[in-house]
Image (spheres, rainbow, N blue to C red):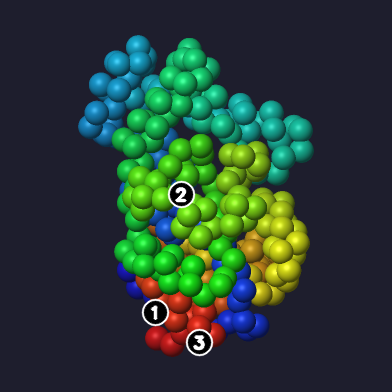
Amino acid sequence: PAGLAPRGRLRPAVRAVLFDLYGTLWASAAGDLDRRNPSPAPAPPGLPELLRRYGCPLSPQELAGALAAAIRRDHEGRRAEGADFPEVRIERLWAELLGLEPPQARAFAVEHEALVNPVWPMPGLRSALRSLRGQGLLLGILSNAQFYTPLLFECFLGAGARELGFREELVLYSCELGLAKPSPRLFEIARERLAAAGVPAARVLMVGNDALRDLAPARAAGFQTALFAGDARSLRGAEQAGEASAVLTDLRQLLRLLKRGRLQP
């Protein structure tokens, strides 16, 4: 817990819930994908051996520096094309840096991610999703992500996002759209798709751990917002908690908030 008390009031009643992933549904040792330390020291156990197996002559720190430079170049090129917050396809960068074919680059990316950013489900995730599925709500995801991110549902919960109740057209991953949060365009796309499903923006709740990247653009899109403060390591913007419609310290509090329309400390 991050020292904040659960509270909130939702008006009007919510009909759809969008979730961030890293720091919200998944506890992450390194944090969101683009906020982590690009050169962790000391290197995670197993990383030097991983590089050896893939024939990489660089040290973990040298490779991290090369990756950071490749990301900067990719971002600069995308910004020149008009993207406000560009997102990379990490498997393409690994293929370029290590001279790997696409299948090997994807395999390396998965192994590398598991070492540098181990994640696990937030407490109560499985039961919270099960309860939400039974309420007739539309569930979606709006998250910075890479191709391996959806695999976490199968890994930890034994089912894909769709089987867990997430609506396919409401699952928005940054790597697939080429834009990362807090790009307003991501939230506009979500708003457009929700409107097509008959849900106005005012009846949408965005749940995330980052007040700047998750909640501020969600409010600008007309959504209600809930700051997830269940993990002090990943909470961002606690000082702005008062701007959120609600604060959650456990995912299981969400069902009570949605059913009653309010949550008291």
Q: Which residue is outermost to the left?
A: 45
**Reading the chain from its start, which is encountered first: label 3 or label 2?**
2
Real-space CA distance between mark 1 and mark 3, rounded to the nearest whole angstrom: 17 Å
**Reading the chain from its start, which is encountered first: label 1 or label 2?**
1
Mark 3 and mark 2 residues within 8 Å of each other at the beta carbon: no
12 and 221: which one is in front? 12
Tell whether 45 sits left or right of 116: left
Mark 3: few/some/many CA within 10 Å (<14, 14-19, 20+): few
Amino acid at pointer 1: Ala
Give the image location of residue 133, x and y in percent.
Answer: 49, 68
Residue 249 visible here: no
Residue under label 1, please give it.
5
Q: Quadrant of the N terminus?
A: bottom left
Is 88 located above or below residue 206 in the figure?
above
Amino acid at pointer 3: Arg
- Using the rendered view, name the quadrant where residue 214 is placed: bottom right
Q: Nearer the viewer, mark 3 or mark 2?
A: 2
At x 35%, y 30%, the residue is: 111
Residue 136 visible here: yes
Residue under label 2, please give it.
160
Mark 1 and mark 2 residues within 8 Å of each other at the beta carbon: no
Amino acid at pointer 2: Gly
**Reading the chain from its start, which is encountered first: label 1 or label 3?**
1
Give the image location of residue 47, x and y in percent.
Answer: 29, 27
- Total labels: the figure holds 3
Task: Using the image, tell me which numbered label, if any, was put on residue 260.
Answer: 3
Disc 2 secondary structure class? loop
Tell whether 225 sits left or right of 160: right
- Using the rendered view, name the quadrant where residue 170 is placed: bottom right
At x 59%, y 66%, the residue is: 138
Q: Nearer the viewer, mark 1 or mark 2?
A: 2
